[in-house]
Every structure is written in structure tokens, then in C-alpha cells.
Image: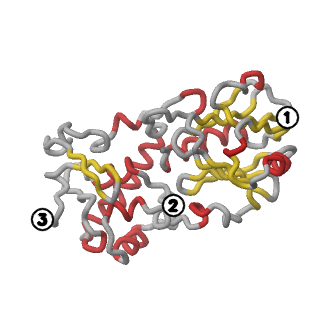
Amino acid sequence: MPELPEVEVVRRTLTKEITNKVIKQVDVFWPRIITYPDNQDEFKLGLEGQKIGKLGRKGKYLIIEIGQHHELVVHFRMTGKFKLLPPEERFQKHIHLFFHFQGEKEGLAYHDVRKFGDFFLVPKGDYRVIKGLYQAGIDPLDASFTYEQFHGLLKSRKRLVKALLLDQSVIAGLGNYLCDELLWFPGEQGVHPARLSHELNEREMKGMYHRMLDVIHQSIRLGGNSFRDFSYGNGIKGQFKQMLKVYAREGKPCFNCGTPIRRETVAGRSSHFCPACQPDSIS
């Protein structure tokens, strides 16, 4: 599933490609991809004839300004992606929505092999029908996300670090690969994913905060991380996979100490870590 960096790359890419374009027509080939409103005619009516404005993001949600009063909110789930196509190619397999633009030779296709994605057309800023977005915690790229705030989020809860980081109502946008990567510190002892959040010391919390931001920004610069079927428009894949230190590296040597990376289930999720550099207790 695309995490914060991947959705941010999509946002930046689409900002260049579709901002200020007017939606002439919307073709719906798989009505169930529209979560709200539950009537596809109402969905189309709210989009057709409207100009696309600013593209935003919170956590894993893409937020597209539609006209003056609405927003189109997209959650990609596992395999959703956008790509520009000539209208005559919109009948390709796995394309479920197609947006025609006035005066343009290409439209925007939504392609989703597993059909897990969600589209919501809502009044601007009103996310009550989108539970995950309405209850979302702070986004790590928000200017207000300071170390002091991060410290408070950890110390005020008695939870496994991995579970807390994955909780979208606490911090929005982190997924499995980001969590595993931010708990491993280059050149020093990191944090075991099964440690309790309120027991972390100052060095560990500061390390997690700065490592989180470093990993996110590096992933964005490299176009994000692409696993399995996920890619960006027109099949472009991100290159951050080459920079992974622990995630998906089970059995391979740790870049710090050479110890084989271990994979265990923590908080119901597969977790990768170095047993030497990330001990399960404070040394």
C-alpha cells in the first residue's frame, strides 16, 4: 500500500499535470469505486464542468480541490494509480474511472487491479463521511509537527512502538516500511519495534523523530518506494527500495554491524529489525 511518500509524489506529479484543467466528462466503469456519494450520477454531476484547483494530501489521502466548494478525496489502497491517456485508450482493463478535460488530448485514468481504492466527493473541508481522514492524526510533513509534539505522543501512551507509529489517528501517513526504517538508526543503537513507547529515552525519541523525517524526505526525492503492483502514472516506479536498511531484508547483513536482519510479527504486522542494533530492552 502506498504510504505518505508515494502519495506525496503522486500529488506533486498530478499538480503539474491537471491543475486548472476543467473536467468535461467523467466515465464510471466500476461504480463501487465511488464510496461517497453512493449515486454515481450525483458524483459525476458534482465534477463535470468544474475546474481542478489545488492538490493537497493528509497522510495517505490525496485531496483534490474541485471548483469553489468541493474536494475529491482519493485513497489508493493496494494497487490504485492515476495515469494520463488519450480518451480512446480509456477502455483498457482495470481502468475504473476516466476524467475527460476540456480542450485536452489526454484525460486522467484511474487504474486499480484489485479495485480496493476509494473516491469521495465531499463539501470542501468536510470529512465526516471519511472516517480515516476525519480521525487522522498529525501529518509528519505538517509544519506544526515538532519534536516536542512527537515526544508528547510517545510519552502519553503505553503502547508498542510499532503499533503506535502505525496508528493513523496518532500520526497520519506511516506504514510498514516507514516504521521499520525509522526505528533503525545509522551508526548507532536503534529501537526495537516491540519496545513500549512511554519507556523510550530522550536519545531514542529524538533519533526516531529525525530518522522519520530523513526517511520520508529521501523517499520522496527518489520517487517513493514501489513494491508488487504499485507504480506511478504511466508505469514509473519509485527508487527508494534501493535505500532500504531493514525492511524486506530478512537474513541480509545489517549495514551497521553485519548481524542478519530478523523478521518477526509485532502488533500484528511483519517487522524487520537488527537484533543486535535494536535490542528489545534498554542497554
Q: Measure the C-alpha gap from mark 3 to mark 1.
A: 63 Å
Circle 1 Cα neighbour tier, 10 Å, few/some/many (<14 / 14–19 / ≥20): some
- Which of these two is toward me, 217 or 231? 231
Q: Which mark is residue 283?
A: 3
Q: Which residue is drawn at 20% across and 37% down?
A: 252
Dot 3, how many residues are within 10 Å of its Cα: few (below 14), some (14-19), or many (20+)? few
Tell me: residue 163, above or below residue 67: below
Q: Which amino acid does label 3 sit on?
A: Ser
Q: Is residue 245 rendered to the left or right of residue 89?
A: left
Disc 1 to disc 2, C-alpha distance: 34 Å
Mark 2 or mark 1, which is nearer the start of the sequence? 1
Percent x, y of residue 227: 43, 36
Point out residue 186 in the picture as x, y percentages from the top left corner. Answer: 24, 49
Name the image quarter holding the C terminus: bottom left
Pointer 1 with pointer 2, Cβ within 8 A: no
Q: Which mark is on residue 102?
A: 1
Mark 2 surroundings: few (<14), some (14-19) or many (≥20) residues within 10 A: many
Q: How is the image coloured?
A: secondary structure
Residue 260 horizontal side relative to residue 160, left or right: left
Which residue appears at 53% of the width and 61% of the height?
A: 142
The answer to whether marks 3 and 1 mark residues whose Cβ atoms lie closer than 8 Å is: no
SS assignment at label 2: loop
| Residue 40 horizontal side relative to residue 79, left or right | right
**Mark 2 lies on residue:** 139
- Residue 274: where, in percent of width, then height? 19, 49
Image quarter of residue 26: top right
Q: Do the residues labelled 3 and 2 touch (CB within 8 Å)?
A: no
